């Protein structure tokens, strides 16, 4: 059928460096990368001060750079086939949309007191855009890493993640939580990272042996996600107020069962998702620590059900994809991943059946929906780095 399971164009850092040399007449001073992510479990919990369990993936935003003379930043994007140019001394909105992320990060770094130097660069990425794999956070962290490299800033991953989140909240205007920026900064090879979104403590947990994490892109893109996302945030805040706690993180299932009665049914379901998802995420990290793949898979299944029925952020295509994935032999669990309403699901699959799984799911999904899915087996990689 389709070529859905073939790998698409990937960024080769050597080719990126050659492109840089062709444009600027010398090799770059550095090549930086920052990965996208897939979240294994812990969805819509980060802005409730809760727990998430994402991993950085083998797809990233890359920038080849050399320091500039003054305060100008000039970047050519290979993906968009255009250049953006701005002055650090006079940052303003306007120009290509992708460059807003660069300016956003520059502004946040400046506000933190960093003295920034301008630079010239060539950028490229292979995190699919708008698919829920955090291409924006990857570009933000790569930008931060580029600035840190040319301006000799100390690279403190968690601090940089917080600044990039601030950049997205304030300059781009998206009220995201901390998960995406944090995992792009602190990712670890072959591990997922349990992140406590209140304390920002992290614990790396190994991916279960003999399993593969497979990303299942439904080929639908989330519409209206911004307004629905903000609405979910408000509902969670309302629920926390009802329980007189700072965030839903502070509510247990037992408390929810006892004192949830006064809540309207919709808010109660939203709260139930967050409270149970936090419990599942902690249980999932423990299961991974013991190498217990079946338990991790079961918790992923339960997470999807909760996101579908209680938090209501799934979509017919995501439900279809998850259903098809689970019906395959060798699938241990599957769920939607990211904000929802479209984009990707993620499955945990036994390694020895992964090729057949990928083929079967791609064919069955395309037959069922007429949409060409993209299916990627992925690996857990390190966070933002300089090559
Ligand atoms: C988006 C946001 C994250 C997180 C997820 C849902 O990816 O950027 O902060 O809230 O949605 O888990």
Image (cartoon, helix red, strand yellow):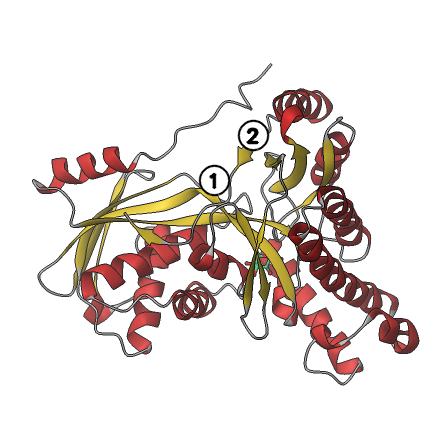
Which of the 4 image quarters holds residue 160? bottom left
Whole-percent x and y of residue 130? 51, 45
**Rendering coords of residue 85 (x, y %):** 21, 55
x%, y% of residue 162? 44, 69
Residue 41 in the image: state x and y as whole percent. Answer: 67, 53
Q: In this view, does 109 lie to the left or right of 68?
A: right
Asked if residue 177 can be seen in this view, the reply is no
Image position of 292 (left or right of 94): right
**Which residue appears at 70% of the width and 27% of the height?**
369
Q: Residues within 10 Å of mark 2 (few under 14, many from 20)?
A: many
Q: In which quarter of the image is residue 322?
A: top right
Q: Does the residue labelled 2 lie within 8 Å of ligand 1?
A: no
Which residue is under mark 1?
128
Tell me if residue 227 can be seen. Answer: yes
Residue at x 7% of width, y 40% of height:
25
Q: How crowded is mark 1: few (under 14 residues within 10 Å), some or many (20 or more)?
A: some
Image height check: is 256 above or below 132?
A: below
Structural distance between the alpha carbons of marks 1 and 2: 10 Å
Q: Are marks 1 and 2 in contact (CB under 8 Å)?
A: yes
Q: Closer to the camera, 297 or 232?
A: 297
**Label 1 vs 2, first from the N-terminus:** 1
* The quadrant where residue 184 appears: bottom left
Which residue is more in the foreground, 30 or 62?
30
Instruction: Identify which residue, 79 or 57, lies in the foreground.
Output: 57
| Residue in the image at 37% along x and 46% along y | 61
- Above or below — where is 199 with respect to 387? below
Q: Which of 49 and 136 is in front in this view?
A: 49
**Mark 2, secondary structure of its residue:** strand
Considering the image in quadrants, where does the N terminus appear?
top right
Residue 329 left/right relative to 182:
right
Q: Mark 2 points at which residue?
A: 374
Q: In this figure, what is the number of numbered marks?
A: 2
């Amino acid at each position: 059928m389709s070529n859905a399971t073939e790998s698409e164009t990937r960024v080769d850092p050597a080719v990126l460096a050659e492109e840089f040399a062709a444009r600027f007449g010398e090799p770059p001073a550095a090549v930086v990368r920052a990965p996208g992510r897939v979240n294994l479990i812990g969805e819509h919990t980060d802005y409730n001060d809760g727990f998430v369990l994402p991993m950085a993936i083998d797809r990233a935003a890359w920038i080849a750079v050399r320091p500039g003379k003054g305060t100008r930043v000039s970047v050519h994007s290979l993906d968009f086939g255009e250049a953006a140019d701005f002055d650090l001394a006079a940052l303003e909105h306007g120009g290509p949309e992708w460059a807003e992320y660069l300016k956003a990060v520059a502004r946040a770094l400046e506000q933190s007191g960093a003295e920034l130097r301008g630079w010239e660069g060539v950028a490229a990425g292979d995190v699919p855009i708008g698919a829920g794999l955090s291409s924006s956070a990857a570009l933000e962290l790569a930008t931060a890493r580029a600035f840190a490299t040319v301006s000799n800033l100390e690279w403190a991953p968690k601090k940089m993640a917080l600044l990039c989140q601030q950049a997205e909240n304030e300059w781009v205007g998206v009220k995201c939580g901390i998960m995406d920026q944090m995992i792009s900064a602190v990712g670890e090879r072959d591990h997922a990272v349990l992140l406590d979104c209140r304390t920002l403590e992290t614990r790396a947990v190994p991916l279960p042996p003999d399993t593969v994490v497979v990303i299942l892109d439904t080929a639908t893109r989330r519409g209206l996600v911004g307004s629905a996302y903000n609405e979910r945030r408000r509902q969670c805040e309302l629920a926390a107020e009802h329980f007189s706690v700072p965030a839903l993180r502070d509510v247990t299932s037992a408390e929810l069962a006892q004192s949830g009665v006064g809540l309207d049914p919709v808010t109660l379901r939203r709260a139930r998702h967050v409270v149970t998802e936090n419990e599942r995420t902690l249980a999932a990290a423990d299961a991974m620590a013991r190498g217990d793949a079946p338990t991790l898979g079961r918790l992923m299944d339960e997470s999807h059900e909760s996101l579908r029925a209680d938090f209501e952020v799934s979509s017919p295509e995501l439900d279809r994809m998850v259903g098809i994935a689970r019906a395959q032999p060798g699938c241990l669990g599957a769920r939607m991943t990211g904000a929802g309403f479209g984009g990707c699901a993620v499955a945990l699959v036994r390694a020895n059946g992964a090729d057949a799984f990928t083929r079967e799911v791609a064919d069955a999904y395309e037959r069922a929906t007429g949409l060409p899915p993209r299916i990627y087996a992925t690996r857990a990689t390190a966070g933002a780095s300089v090559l």
